[in-house]
Image (cartoon, helix red, strand yellow):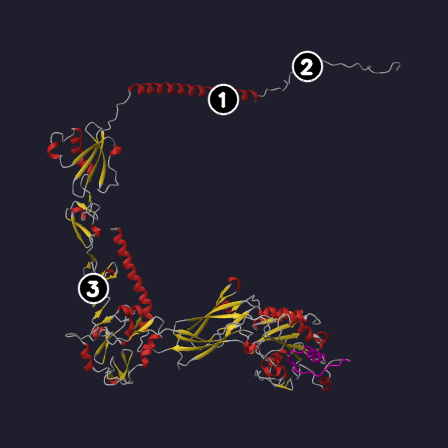
Amino acid sequence: MTNFKLLTCAGVLCCLIWNGFAQQGGSDCIKANAKSCGECIQAGPNCGWCKKTDFLQEGEPTSARCDDLAALKSKGCPLEDIENPRGSKQLLENREVTNRKKGAAEKLKPEAITQIQPQKLSLHLRVGEPQTFSLTFKRAEDYPIDLYYLMDLSYSMKDDLENVKSLGTALMLEMEKITSDFRIGFGSFVEKTVMPYISTTPAKLRNPCTGDQNCTSPFSYKNVLSLTSEGNKFNELVGKQHISGNLDSPEGGFDAIMQVAVCGEQIGWRNVTRLLVFSTDAGFHFAGDGKLGGIVLPNDGKCHLENNVYTMSHYYDYPSIAHLVQKLSENNIQTIFAVTEEFQAVYKELKNLIPKSAVGTLSSNSSNVIQLIIDAYNSLSSEVILENTKLPKGVTISYKSFCKNGVNGTQEDGRKCSNISIGDEVTFEINITANECPKKEQNETIKIKPLGFTEEVEINLQFICECQCQSEGEPNSPACHAGNGTFECGACRCNEGRIGRLCECSTDEVNSEDMDAYCRRENSTEICSNNGECICGQCVCKKRENTNEVYSGKYCECDNFNCDRSNGLICGGNGICKCRVCECFPNFTGSACDCSLDTTPCMASNGQICNGRGTCECGTCNCTDPKFQGPTCETCQTCLGVCTEHKDCIQCRAFDKGEKKETCSQECMYFNMTRVESRDKLPQPNQPDPLSHCKEKDVDDCWFYFTYSVNSNGEVNVHVVETPECPSGPDIIPIVAGVVAGIVLIGLALLLIWKLLMIIHDRREFAKFEKEKMNAKWDTQENPIYKSPINNFKNPNYGRKAGL
């Protein structure tokens, strides 16, 4: 019985869970009200379209073909007739990352070195279904480096220039430890050549410095040396440079950075690691500051070098920080800001805005510039950060990183890995999801690349917005009312101006009263039973808020939710509601399928249905004897207990005494009796037959013990202990002795208590007497009429000298 209840509950729970999932998944599909297969598959990744011609029931709209996959199967749509295209991915270019050691005999060209895999792939995207691929990055050993040193040549950098003049060969020697293919270039900047940034007097234009200092004319930016592998040439050309000067403290370095970034041909950038070292001891001007000099045109982000000199500084404003970030990123340039201690805070804030940039502290005379460059390069190259180009509308991307030492990252941290050494390999898991189809249904291309690197992954996005069966459609099909629509995917897609399931009506006929007559039941004035809309003389049933509840029928007179309920469930969860009538599952009956035909719950422990005292109806015992009740008619509230009911017969047969002693042979022969020696010999409860243990008193006030049981054949078996337990009489002598002893002891105790109280009382009285005695005071004052009997006399001559 318990197992049956558990199975029933589990079955109902499974039904509820399935219905919940069906409603959740099918809800989006049905609510989309899709008129075609293409609209259906765009409603969600779990939506399918049934192209079976006779799938729809009478009164169901075309949109009912679109539903959750499980719901379509349950409605009878074969799997081969369900259109459910899935997304996919295809690798188009997938070269392995390069395993190359420094000093190898084979010298590879930069374009032959691969650090990122794959290089090109194609994704077929269905709306709501993400496509995932892995991207591998491996930092190659001996990877070529281009380094451009951009230096502030304002007067305050005079001593720094002296140290930079020998930078070429010294830096070459240090960089040989990292790469065998290293090139270096040099550029300088001062300020825009207009007031108030510089003095425009002729003398100051020739020599902006004061006193006898020999300075060069001010300029905005000059490309002194394009990238070269000749360190001596760097020293030679930089050695010829002279300091210049300007008026204000901030410098025009942003103009110079922009030209270095966009003038790739003049600078000589290769598709390798590109480093820009920006050296200064001052702040910077940015977009908007040009208005001070009357310059209002925003920087155009284009190259304006003539004879290696920036010629449009007086025409275009300084670039903004965002503009610089864009151009540096587009050209894969990593920036190292080598600035003095005074401006560290400013450039660290700037670093936070420019990806793949670093800040180093420059000594007052730039003597530590080589170590600063090495440290900054190691810092930049130890971190890889992925970025993607602009995504098409409705497309989202997410990253998950799998870095060194088991460190994983998600969301923004999923784009990057840190502490990467040369030869380390890291992996990124990238999810791309289309949330809607593009209006023009055109393919799109996006690119993903590590910041500061020229390599990238090209991804071609192809959107699945139509079903395969739509390409097989038959235009102007005879199946669509003499060619008024295209028959595709099992349904008609009507031409403009035509409506109806088979495109049988024009839009002008929709409200015709003559057609409404076809949508009324006989002897009824309700159109489509008030549950639908009459279109072209046919009822199209309306949809319910709960997408699992459906109207159907020629006149929308049927539904699957107005059947009888039991326990709050339609058809008790044991049947299917069809046209307001329950069709019960096997083993259930009744208008709400709430009557179980299973007799297991009525089975008593003795193997009888309802203990033979009733009938099993709908899984519940209906007791025919009104005295009995309970799940299996086992309880009788007004009946004597088994032990009391049978004790007289057992007493007369076992001990030949009791009230039925005279009629024992007539009334008490209905059971089999077995005598046992002791209570331990009685049958125990673990036997198959129901058993009752009894303890009763006989006429002599003795206790006798027996068991009563009924086997499956209805035979009554009684086991009785052959010797009753009779209580022995009381022992008088000990009782009397005890009473006497108790009286004596109580008397002695009372005497002792009286004596003790008297002693305490006497001691208190004595103490009180002593206290009063000590506190007594006697009167010692003299009597006023008393006179002493003693008189004192003094000789006047006593003590005088003789002879006086």
Residue 229 falls within the magenta-colored stretch: yes
Between marks 1 and 3 in the image, the one whose residue lies nearer the viewer = 3
Can residue 345 be seen at all in this image of the molecule?
Answer: no
Label ID, residue 764: 1
Amino acid identity at mark 2: Ser
What residue span does the magenta drawing correspond to? 212-239
Horizontal and vertical percent position of residue 679: 25, 32
Image vertical order of residue 371 relative to residue 392, above or below: above
Amino acid identity at mark 3: Cys
Amino acid identity at mark 1: Arg
Q: 10 Å neighbourhood of mark 2: few (<14), some, or many (≥20)?
A: few
Cα distance in 3D space between marks 1 and 3? 101 Å
Q: Earlier in the sequence, mark 1 or mark 2?
A: 1
Label ID, residue 788: 2
Disc 1 is placed on an element classified as: helix
Residue 538 falls within the magenta-colored stretch: no
